[in-house]
Amino acid sequence: MKRERLFWLQVATPFIAILFAFLIGAVIVVAIGKNPLYVFGTMLAFAFGQIDSLGLILFRATPYIFTGLSVAIGFQLGLFNIGAESQYKVGLFTAAVVGYSFPGLPAIIHIPLTILAGVAGGMLWGLLPIVLKLKRGVHEVISTIMLNYTAVSLLHYLLTGPFLDQNQIGATQRIMRTKFIADSARIPTVHGLTKLLHIPLPNYVHLNYMFFIGIALCAAIYWLIWKTPFGYELRAVAGNQAAAQAAGINVKRTMFITFMLSAGIAGLAGLSEMMTSYGYMSVDFPSGYGFTGIAVALLGKNNPFGVILAALLFGFLERGAEGIQVIAGVPQEVITILQGIIILSVVVAYSILSRYIRIQKKKEAA
Amino acid sequence: MVWTALLIAAAVRMTIPILLTALGATFSERSGVVNIGLEGMMIAGTFWGAFGALKGGPLFGFFLAMVAGMVLALVHAVVSIRFKVDQVVSGTAINILAAGLARFFSIMIFHMATTSPKVNAFAKISIPLLKDIPGLGPMFTDLSPVIIVAFILVPVSAYVLNRTVFGLRLRSVGENPLAADTLGINVYLMRYAGVLISGAFAGLAGAFLAVEHTGSYIEGQTGGRGFIALAAMIFGNWTPGGALAASLLFGLAQAVTLRVQIPGIPYQFIQMLPYLLTIAVLAGFVRKAVGPAADGIPYEREGE
């Protein structure tokens, strides 16, 4: 088969799968008595029609870049990190504590320190599953899910007890949250940049430099996997563990480092909001970034650049969902259903594609 | 003594959803298919169980829940058996899909995102003679009939798996699908059957939570029990009897979180108990357990 044709088939596959998912979405929309063309049209017009909406798509995509990359790097090795969901929340908490604990630090030190605290929190929460997997053979899917529930209880205790901000002056209702982080720990938004480029981005869009850090991190991970000796080891272990072991690669060490990377990157996912619009970690901080990250990783075929594209798609879906809820009266949850269907149709499409390629190769060989 | 009996009675109630799901998981895994999507199938069971109970009584609720669980199971089966997608990936997608669907239907039908109206449960029964034993009485009084049915399903499942032709074939495709295939057993059909049975059981478990335990659908009420049930099945060495013993342990842990308060220990730490216990059990025992040889591996026929 021609290489060129193969390339285009691989590019087209996810789009066909997404189209298929939207078709099923259309059936659901018809079932609740709405016109799917009107609903999806509204979604597109709302999401792409205004500059604030475009900014919000990028802002929404930011956490998914991190959780998507986190899950993708684990998948590279066949490690299924469903724990990104709690790793990012623990990372948020540790980052928030560092963010408010050192007022007066120069921002140039405080911001990186806060980000690193997020990484450390994520890694901390990823440590037990990988150690138990390597030492005791506990499947990481079950242990990470159990730790997701454990983290909810633990963070609830910490945020309503020892780390609750007691001095919420002027508040009519007390929020279960930490203290506000210091100004020196707040990451700058892109408004300085957009003003320079004469883009009228409204102030309520908190798009910030975490978005660019996410993109840079994807590039770095791509480089790590495909251009470094460690990446070579990683791909060798992914391909054939026994062969890698026989070639002298320390399989367990490779798995440990990869999982720690995955957990550390997950720890960054909530920071885009925590270090701008929120300014604190709270009990009701947005949930679900880790689960959506699984969908993002699968859609992006575990490729760091694929993750960026998939994260942008999910950012668009969420922003569009707000539009159809307000304007067309369709519940936002249609989008959650769509996410589930996208995963299924994408993995099925990839499976059909790889089988097709195999059959073609067999024919050519014959 | 009465306090202990009440705790045990609660433990038995909390055992049921885990037990039912673990029994179903046994069928799926013995046929060679890992079903991480059980949590989602339970979620479907909670919603459709409550909906059915509201419209046509508890029996109709359990029926609808079973069908809903099987519909999701069919999706998992088609994706992982027919299209040979990684079974954990497919199951995870089912979980995300089920959560979205339940919320969506809840808004459309109940006009509330997270709860249903109150629903009626089956009439409670008390076991004659046993209920009069002093001290132990509460364990045998006002029981949901589903509890008794669930316990009966343990030996029934063991019988089907170990003593019937169907069970023998199901186990053979989980151990050595190629050998089974050469003997003329339809590997795909047996695996579909295993996964569908697990979906039916998970749906029933969800209905138990919504209809019998809580008396309404509440978002998130499954609380990871689908995953805990998988751990119970592994801890129970892929057998119905073992699943029962493990489920009783996890049921007790959940009853403790509901009923026990220890001064000086924040309740959130008690809430963690079932989850940490699950990890501890897997860490301590999983090495001794040996699953079906072809569990989790898609079967590929020669020449396809």
Image (cartoon, coloured by chain):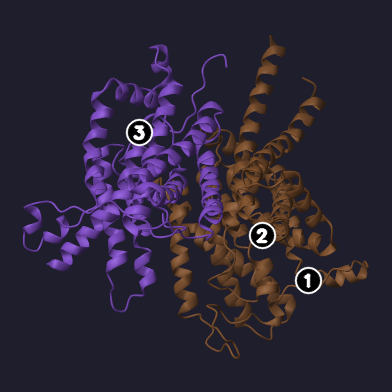
Q: Amino acid at mark 2?
A: Pro
Q: Quadrant of the N terminus of chain A?
A: top right
Q: Residue furthest front?
A: B56
**What residue is disc 2 on?**
A63
Residue A233 visible? The answer is: no
> A320 or A17: nearer the eye?
A320
**Residue drawn at (71%, 42%), measured in percent from left and top?**
A226
Distance, label 2 to label 3, CA atoms, is 38 Å
Chain that bears disc 1: A
Distance, label 3 to label 1, CA atoms, is 54 Å
Chain letter, colour purple in render: B
Q: Amino acid at mark 1?
A: Thr
Residue A49 visible? The answer is: yes
Q: Image check: B139 left or right of A231?
A: left
Question: In this structure image, what is the colour of chain A?
Answer: brown
**What residue is disc 1 on?**
A189
**Residue drawn at (60%, 67%), measured in percent from left and top?**
A118
Identify the image quadrant of residue A100: bottom right
